[in-house]
Image (spheres, rainbow, N blue to C red):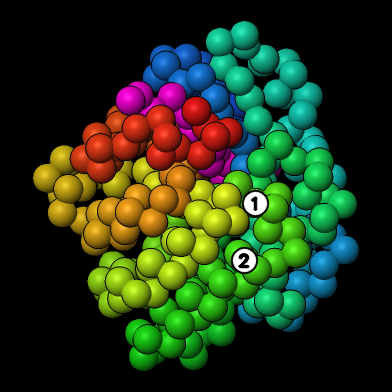
């Protein structure tokens, strides 16, 4: 089965996005890569939800006045570009990468706004933004935070709008090797979470940026592979994402196919929106 989708693309609208992260470029690359469906998912925190108590709130709501809040009005600015570069060969989806909200134990999007997106992805591993720093050590505390976050996302009142949990357990900007945490994750916990995720029709993302500079052998042996195999066993669907923040990341997107082949994925294993 060929992977012909990418549901995790950031543009210049994300504050961590490179100026080269332009719709025009992504449409061109999608054609070169033979992608049929691409989903734009800039970082997002819905305005009606108070996030002021999360440690990294400044990322979503910069106070220097130079950058806009990463809210719905901000994300809407991509729409004219999506229309301008529309292409009959590539289906485009307007989505967001929203955030885990540890204060309200939910997801940072209201139902009213959630309805306006074609898809929504949520990380439980932006611990560099959402988690108090004293939970980095011992490792188990960090891991427990991400397990709790996974449960909270699956249990949230907007769970039916969520397409996938992204880069699960791949703690972003972790001050130590984040695969330590993945290796510590017990099979029982994984089976419980991924079975629940399957029941809620929330897919699990294979984040290709994590394997960008790896050889096929390294991908076959990476810590994530053990987790991916359990996801598959639990009947949870997959979605692939490049997590592109610039115009270079897509060049390594061939690793998506490699991972799919290593796992023996078929069409059935892919989230319906991405088939
Ligand atoms: Zn992310
Ligand atoms: Zn992302």
* Magenta-highlighted residues: 1-19
Q: Residue furthest top?
A: 88
Identified at 52% across, 63% down, the residue is: 196
Q: Mark 1 points at which residue?
A: 162
Q: x, y percentage for residue 146?
A: 49, 74
Q: In which quarter of the image is residue 102?
A: bottom right
Q: Dot 1 lies on which element?
A: loop
9 magenta-colored: yes
Classified by dominant secondary structure, the portion drawn in magenta counts as loop
Q: In which quarter of the image is residue 7?
A: top right
Quadrant (top left/top right/bottom left/bottom right) for the N terminus: top left
Q: x, y percentage for residue 126?
A: 53, 66
Identified at 87% across, 63% down, the residue is: 48
Q: Dot 2 lies on which element?
A: helix
Q: In which quarter of the image is residue 151?
A: bottom right
Mark before the other along the chain sequence, 2 or 1: 2
Is 4 drawn above or below residue 205 in the view shown?
above
> Label 2: how many residues lie within 10 Å, few (<14), some (14-19) or many (20+)?
many
Mark 2–mark 1 distance (CA, rounded to whole Å): 9 Å
Res. 6 visible in picture? yes
Q: Mark 2 points at which residue?
A: 153
Task: Find residue 69 and name its label.
Answer: none
Q: Are marks 2 and 1 in contact (CB under 8 Å)?
A: yes
Identified at 46% across, 67% down, the residue is: 193
Q: Describe residue 51's horizontal placement relative to residue 23 as left or right.
A: right
Q: x, y percentage for residue 249?
A: 40, 36
Res. 244 visible in picture? no
Q: Describe residue 94's horizontal placement relative to residue 164 as left or right.
A: right
């Amino acid at each position: 089965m060929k992977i012909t989708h990418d549901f995790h693309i950031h543009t210049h609208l994300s504050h961590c996005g490179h100026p080269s992260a332009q719709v025009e470029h992504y449409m061109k690359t999608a054609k070169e890569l033979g992608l049929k469906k691409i989903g734009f998912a800039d970082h997002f925190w819905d305005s009606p939800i108070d996030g002021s108590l999360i440690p990294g709130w400044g990322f979503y709501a910069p106070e220097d006045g130079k950058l806009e809040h990463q809210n719905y009005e901000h994300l809407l600015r991509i729409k004219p570009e999506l229309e301008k570069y529309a292409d009959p060969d590539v289906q485009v989806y307007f989505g967001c990468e929203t955030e885990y909200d540890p204060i309200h134990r939910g997801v940072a999007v209201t139902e009213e706004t959630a309805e306006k997106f074609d898809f929504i992805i949520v990380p439980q591993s932006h611990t560099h933004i959402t988690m108090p720093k004293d939970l980095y050590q011992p490792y188990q505390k960090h891991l427990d935070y991400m397990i709790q976050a996974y449960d909270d996302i699956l249990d949230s009142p907007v769970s039916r709008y969520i397409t996938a949990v992204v880069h699960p357990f791949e703690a972003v900007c972790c001050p130590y090797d984040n695969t330590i945490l993945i290796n510590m994750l017990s099979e029982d916990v994984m089976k419980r979470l991924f079975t629940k995720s399957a029941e809620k029709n929330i897919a699990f993302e294979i984040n290709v940026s994590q394997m960008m500079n790896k050889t096929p052998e390294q991908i076959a042996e990476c810590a994530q592979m053990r987790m991916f195999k359990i996801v598959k066993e639990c009947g949870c669907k997959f979605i692939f994402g490049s997590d592109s923040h610039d115009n270079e990341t897509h060049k390594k997107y061939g690793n998506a196919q490699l991972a799919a082949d290593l796992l023996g994925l078929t069409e059935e294993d892919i989230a319906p929106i991405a088939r």
